[in-house]
Image: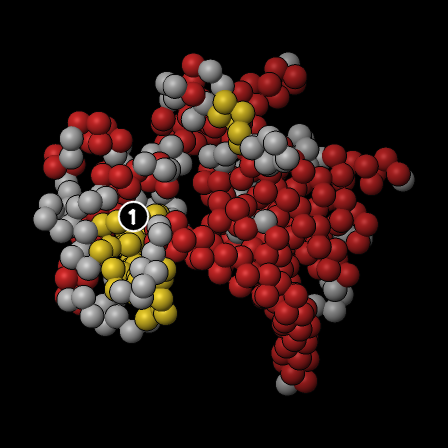
């Protein structure tokens, strides 16, 4: 009985020391990490919003594929569109996107954020120009959901990474419908 | 006496290389070796965790009751891994992103638990630290070799750390344009691992005669 107590105590002691050390390191690094995460987000917002200004973050979207959205206003304060933060699945697991739409649901700009796609294949979706095939679609023109809806050059650019493309296009199309549903409010 | 310590340090490099001879920690080996920079980063993470966990396990080897030694090792290893993870996230976020899930998985990297169980709990603090350094340097060398071959053939680039005006990417002519894509995929990693293992086996068998 005494031995059992001793064993438990040793293990608890080691855990306590480990936890204390971790709390200390966390205290040192947490502000730095938060700063970095925020800078990534601000950078992405700036890139997709163009000349417009993103407003307050709205977390309540009632949709599990949309983690948050921002209203996008022009310099006179008129609503011109929305920026959506979308989550989807690619070949390497979850991925997140920041996409800006005008009030009619037409894609203005898009950017792929966190992802674990294969370098050289799906990872190419991070490159500049990949999202061009979605820009201007979603309003009068449909968003391409399959490879055969793309022209040849675009279809080649997604070759070998169809799963990534499908994940991204479904999310962007879903976002467009969500913006329709908001109805310019 | 000194030569014995040196032997503990150097055995991990070739004679008992963790990747090619002991064949431990293959999961992260195969998955993070798509770029040279990832291999170096993973190596640095393993170096830190392995050296400190070996030192602490060696220090505590008399205090840790035999019946709960594995949980104790895991707690110690997990604590150091979490530290590496937080520090990397804060100061080298690009590397943190690249290593992804394999960084926290250092906890269950069998090299670390293996060395704790096979070496650190039986040997002095100095020897354990030397063993940790040798093993992780050996691990880093193997990882760098694999990633160098995979990246050069598979993407036609060599990605290192960006410094000043150098963006960290060396492009190799021809291969950059027509890469052997399979090398960046899991199948290519397996294939290369098999060839390298065969090559090292051939080397050793030739040496023995």
Image-quadrant location for residue B82: bottom right
| SS type, badge 1 | strand
Residue A158 placement (x, y as % from top left) = 25, 34
- From the image, which quarter does the N terminus of chain B lie in? top right
B91 lies left or right of B105? right
Name the residue tied to disc 1. Answer: A109
Image-quadrant location for residue B180: top left
What's the residue at 82%, 41% (across, down)? B5
Q: Chain of mark 1?
A: A
A101 lies left or right of B123? left
Image-quadrant location for residue A41: bottom left
> Residue pushed farthest front?
A76
What's the residue at 53%, 63% (across, down)? A34
Is A59 drawn above or below residue A167 in the view shown?
below
Residue B176 placement (x, y as % from top left) = 43, 21
Is B175 drawn above or below residue A55 in the view shown?
above
Residue A163 placement (x, y as % from top left) = 24, 42
Residue A175 placement (x, y as % from top left) = 21, 58
A96 lies left or right of B174? left
Is A71 drawn above or below residue B116 in the view shown?
below
């Amino acid at each position: 009985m005494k031995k059992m107590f001793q064993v438990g105590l040793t293990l608890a002691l080691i855990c306590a020391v480990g936890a204390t050390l971790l709390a200390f390191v966390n205290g040192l690094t947490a502000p730095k990490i938060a700063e970095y995460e925020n800078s990534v987000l601000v950078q992405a917002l700036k890139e997709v919003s163009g000349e417009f200004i993103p407003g307050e973050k709205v977390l309540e979207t009632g949709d599990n594929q949309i983690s948050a959205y921002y209203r996008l206003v022009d310099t006179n304060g008129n609503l011109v569109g929305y920026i959506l933060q979308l989550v989807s699945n690619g070949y390497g697991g979850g991925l997140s996107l920041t996409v800006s739409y005008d009030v009619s649901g037409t894609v203005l700009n898009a950017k792929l954020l966190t992802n674990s796609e294969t370098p050289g294949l799906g990872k190419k979706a991070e490159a500049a120009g990949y999202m061009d095939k979605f820009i201007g679609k979603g309003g009068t023109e449909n968003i391409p959901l399959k490879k055969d809806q793309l022209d040849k050059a675009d279809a080649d650019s997604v070759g070998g990474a169809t799963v990534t493309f499908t994940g991204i296009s479904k999310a962007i199309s879903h976002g467009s419908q969500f913006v329709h549903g908001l109805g310019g409010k | 006496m000194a030569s014995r310590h040196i032997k503990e340090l150097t055995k991990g490099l070739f004679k008992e290389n963790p990747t090619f001879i002991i064949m431990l920690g293959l999961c992260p080996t195969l998955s993070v070796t798509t770029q040279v920079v990832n291999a170096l980063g993973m190596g640095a993470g393993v170096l830190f965790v392995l050296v400190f966990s070996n030192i602490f396990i060696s220090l505590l080897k008399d205090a840790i009751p035999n019946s709960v030694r594995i949980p104790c090792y895991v707690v110690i290893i997990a604590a150091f891994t979490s530290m590496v993870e937080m520090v990397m996230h804060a100061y080298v976020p690009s590397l943190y992103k690249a290593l992804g899930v394999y960084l926290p998985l250092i906890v269950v990297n069998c090299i670390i638990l293996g060395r704790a169980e096979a070496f650190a709990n039986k040997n002095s603090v100095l020897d354990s630290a030397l063993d940790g350094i040798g093993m992780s340097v050996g691990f880093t060398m193997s990882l760098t070799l694999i990633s160098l071959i995979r990246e050069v053939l598979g993407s036609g680039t060599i990605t290192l750390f960006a410094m000043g005006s150098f963006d960290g990417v060396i492009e190799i002519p021809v291969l950059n344009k027509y890469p052997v894509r399979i090398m960046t995929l899991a199948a290519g990693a397996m294939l290369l691992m098999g060839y390298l293992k065969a090559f090292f086996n051939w080397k050793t068998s030739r040496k023995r005669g």
